[in-house]
Amino acid sequence: MVNPLNVEGANPFEIAQEAATQIAKISGISTHDIALTLGSGWAKAADLIGETVSEIPGSEIIGFSKPAVVGHVGTIRSIRLPNGKHALVIGARTHFYENHGVRSVVHSVRTAAAAGAKTMILTNGAGGIKPEWAGGAAVLISDHINLTASSPLEGATFIDLTDLYSKRLRDLARTVDASLDEGVYVQFRGPHYETPAEVQMAKIMGGHIVGMSTALEAIAAREAGMEIMGMSLITNLAAGIQTTPLSHAEVLEAGRNAEARIGKLLAEIVTKL
């Protein structure tokens, strides 16, 4: 199947608007107030934040496809929050390493913006550089370093990324859990894990968290005028910090072990938005 986002001459914002229209028609909810992209370990939050109005297979919405990663949910859920607002929960995430193009990576964010969301919460499972984060710490993202050599911005589009990850939202999260630490997220292209030397490079550059998502999505969210909060579940210590080999099975196990705890944490944060 041809991905319409990559057809020559296609307008990715028009396709995102069409996707948002489809979601509104199927869910019966015309406007969503916030959006959440739930990465490895975070899916439990969707069951805790409110009442599910509609759950849609991502492959039924234009521009979305089935996730290529075991452990990622391939649905889009419309959830009514206790305060009457509506959240769009995106489990159908496309990663840059899938080689569908950067437009596909950020399509979910642009769809959320077209659906009316003003707040974007981006979560992921990632490797930690700080040894004290061993054991499944939840960490706020304060900034990022984009090492993908790409951007979702096209043409002469100049967007300020100062305070990309909202300090206001980080402070709000700490009213739920004052012990939450924060750090700079470094997005590598993947899908291979980083080498110990690359992890040390990231550390020297000011990074604390390494992963394969989030940064490109955050840039697109800022372009759309959304306020952004990022959170990482530290599923493992990064290569060279952790002495044992890395594996996706380890990531999945860490996510399962932490999902109840971090799901509850994120749900409590969402109730304050």
Image (spheres, rainbow, N blue to C red):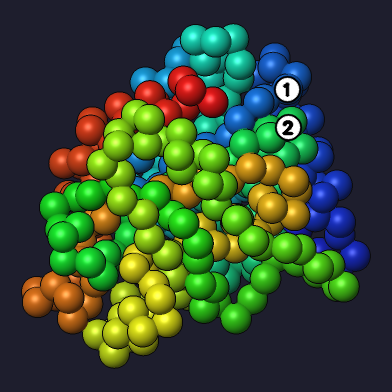
Q: Which residue is labeled 2 in the image?
A: 115
Using the rendered view, name the quadrant where residue 62 is placed. top right
Distance CA(mark 1)–CA(mark 2): 6 Å
User: On the rendered image, what quadrant is the C terminus found in?
Assistant: top right
- In the rendered image, residue 45, in percent from the top left (x then y), is placed at 37, 30
Label 2: state its secondary structure.
loop
Q: Mark 1, residues whose alpha carbon is within 10 Å: few (<14), some, or many (≥20)? A: many
> Relative to 159, is 113 above or below?
above
Q: For residue 31, which numbered disc appears in the image?
A: 1
Q: Residue at x 30, y 37 (%)?
A: 178
- In the rendered image, residue 57, in percent from the top left (x then y), is placed at 54, 34
At label 2, the amino acid type is Ala
**Residue farthest along the bottom direction in this orientation:** 197
Q: Residue at x 68, y 35 (%)?
A: 118
- In the rendered image, residue 262, in percent from the top left (x then y), is placed at 28, 36
Q: Are marks 1 and 2 in contact (CB under 8 Å)?
A: yes
Q: Residue at x 26, y 56 (%)?
A: 234
Q: Residue at x 68, y 33 (%)?
A: 117
Q: Mark 2, residues whose alpha carbon is within 10 Å: few (<14), some, or many (≥20)? A: many
